[in-house]
């Protein structure tokens, strides 16, 4: 097993990405190909330069975080994101992990690997921590300005992902809106409601913002604009809550008790809300396994993303996803 | 000062609304007119039935939470929401507070009081708790399917609200998007960016989900669909966090220390995240003061909403808002 890791992606530079990849390599006993500027990678690797299971694949271009994805892919044919997917396409890698420009990662996956049959718009699915376990939020940034049919396809893909990779059976699907009743929401959502209602999915209707955490559903469907706002907001909220709580307890008798007794418990609490635990978001609907990580990923987040990629490859995510989708699509056609 | 309170609104029935209104009456020394079914109100008032400063204005219709706002207003001319605004229009009340169907409350305010000159779409502004104080989120549910010009107007109204009612000077305005760089976002947001950039507002560019709490800006502009999702999600997250934290600490030495020492501190923490503290969201851009409360409002939330209404009336919110808006609009016209 060989995972291609975009070494140039992420806000924290190659050092963090390389560290995470090395850790995953050690823990999983897999091969990693670090794609990017070989000099920068060598510097980041320090003493690990002569490691056996770590390969460096040099390329001299990098897509910047603020670049337009399509322009960057057109103009930078030798960029680390693109080259990583080229390796996967050629069979030299089994999956791609990138913490770089997420739009460009998504676009490179679609351009180079192609779309699964029946999928118009591949999407990013993210596992969110909830009160009763994880919730799949789809789409979290790939697709803005969606049509209703795309929201239906997001539901179908997430359902396939949940059943084939997470072992869920008949996961409940909710459509993110601003009221539970049919007819609530914007035009896109009102039309998507009808499509989801008439699909073979276990669609329970509209859900609201609070249901991203409540456990009412296992899958929350929304467009990539709303999903990205929700995802980043929940990260921000986790930080705000931790900071409010720390302030609140500082200086009090309780605060002192906390510092003496509670560091571990508090850390576990932070961990529940820490997206680094979840690694990254799989791109669903492309012909291969691609994982998009948060730009601000820590080494641990990168390590967990590589582990996730290994898990998806071992569970033949893409094959099972294709089967599920074509099965559901034909159910849809019959309906 | 007399505040008209829609006694039939809210998920918890007249009892909670009436309790909150009575509490506000006691604390502020103001008059309250409870609008709704006089029998149900009398039952809810119990021993307070003969109170001096509390009036009951009977009407026999109620807009249900799941009803279509426009249809309900057309068909139920004698509904508590509508009648409350009628009282304001006739000068028999100074402001309206409702925890009922928020779309219908908004629509009734617009229909009966009319819009402030220069405002195409009145909006709901909500104060969100943040790491560095409150953040105004606008719009939180009134307007789905907005055009870019509406987002600009939301920014202008929130700016007027912040300067005239909250005492802020040159509040920083951010546009909620999925990347900080110009050009990120959906079509609506990309076009609104240009309008906000060229306006006299202190526009700092796009902000992301995490900035609803980070303190980077005092005002976050978005359409009513996204705003409503964000609002309800942050409520859900506050609950999830509290529940995760309680679970995490249960049974441990720390947990025991917490129950012994920390109840008060923990309660203060919950309070920081409790929307009841903030009362309700003002409808900006109508000719009068209308406050929309959460459907699940507690008596304390209703009390705080009535207090907020009194504050806005005393500070002549509507007059100052009109002046600010016409001033900014003419600055816009010159630009």
Image: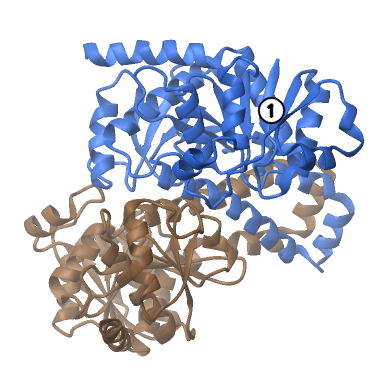
Chain colours: A brown, B blue
Residue at the location (23% across, 67% down)? Answer: A121
Relative height, residue A309 to residue A276 (above, below): below
- The x, y position of residue B66, in whole percent, is 54, 53
Nearest to the observer: residue A263 or residue A57: A263
- The x, y position of residue A288, in whole percent, is 24, 80
Q: Residues within 10 Å of mark 1 (few under 14, many from 20)?
A: many
> In which quadrant of the rendered view does residue B138 lie?
top left
Left/right placement of residue A273 relative to residue A173 reads right
Relative height, residue A138 to residue B8 (above, below): below
> In which quadrant of the rendered view does residue B172 lie?
top left
Q: Quadrant of the N terminus of chain B?
A: top right
Residue at the location (38% across, 30% down)? Answer: B121
> In which quadrant of the rendered view does residue B279 lie?
top right
Residue at the location (18% across, 50% down)? Answer: A68
- Residue B112 visible in the displayed image: yes
- Residue A11 visible in the displayed image: no
Q: Which residue is mark 1?
A: B306
Q: Quadrant of the C terminus of chain B?
A: top left
Element carrying mark 1: helix
Nearest to the observer: residue B320 or residue B25: B25
Farthest residue to the right: give it. Answer: B47
Left/right placement of residue A114 relative to residue B219 reads left
Counting labels gives 1
Residue at the location (24% across, 23% down)? Answer: B198
- The x, y position of residue B2, in whole percent, is 70, 19
- The x, y position of residue B184, in whole percent, is 26, 45
Nearest to the observer: residue A195 or residue A297: A195
């Amino acid at each position: 097993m060989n995972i291609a890791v975009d070494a140039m992606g992420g806000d924290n530079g190659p050092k963090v990405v390389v560290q995470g990849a090395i850790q995953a390599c050690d823990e999983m006993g897999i091969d990693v190909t670090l794609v990017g500027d070989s000099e920068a990678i060598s510097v980041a690797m320090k003493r690990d330069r002569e490691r056996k299971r770590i390969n460096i694949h040099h390329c001299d271009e990098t897509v910047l975080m603020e670049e337009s994805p399509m322009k960057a892919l057109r103009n930078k044919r030798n960029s680390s994101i693109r080259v990583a997917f080229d390796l996967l396409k050629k069979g030299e890698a089994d999956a791609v992990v990138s913490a770089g420009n997420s739009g460009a990662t998504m676009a490179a996956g679609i351009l180079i690997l192609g779309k699964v049959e029946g999928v118009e718009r591949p999407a990013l699915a993210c596992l969110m921590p909830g009160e009763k376990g994880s919730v799949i939020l789809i789409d979290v940034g790939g697709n803005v300005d969606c049509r209703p049919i795309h929201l239906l396809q997001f539901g179908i893909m997430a359902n396939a992902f949940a059943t084939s990779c997470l072992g869920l059976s008949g996961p409940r699907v909710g459509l993110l809106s601003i009221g539970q009743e049919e007819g609530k929401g914007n035009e896109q959502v009102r039309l998507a409601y009808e499509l989801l209602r008439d699909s073979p999915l276990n669609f329970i209707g509209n859900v609201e913002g609070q249901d991203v955490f409540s456990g009412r559903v296992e899958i929350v469907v929304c467009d990539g604009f709303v999903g990205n706002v929700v995802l980043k907001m929940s990260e921000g909220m986790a930080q705000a809550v931790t900071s409010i709580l720390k302030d609140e307890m500082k200086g009090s008798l309780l605060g002192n008790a906390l510092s003496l007794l509670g560091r571990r418990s508090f850390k576990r609490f932070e961990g529940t809300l820490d997206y680094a635990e979840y690694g990254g978001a799989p791109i669903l609907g492309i012909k291969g396994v691609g994982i998009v990580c948060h730009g601000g990923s820590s080494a641990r987040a990168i390590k967990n993303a590589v582990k996730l990629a290994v898990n998806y490859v071992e569970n033949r995510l893409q094959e099972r996803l294709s089967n599920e989708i074509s099965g559901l699509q034909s159910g849809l056609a019959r309906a």
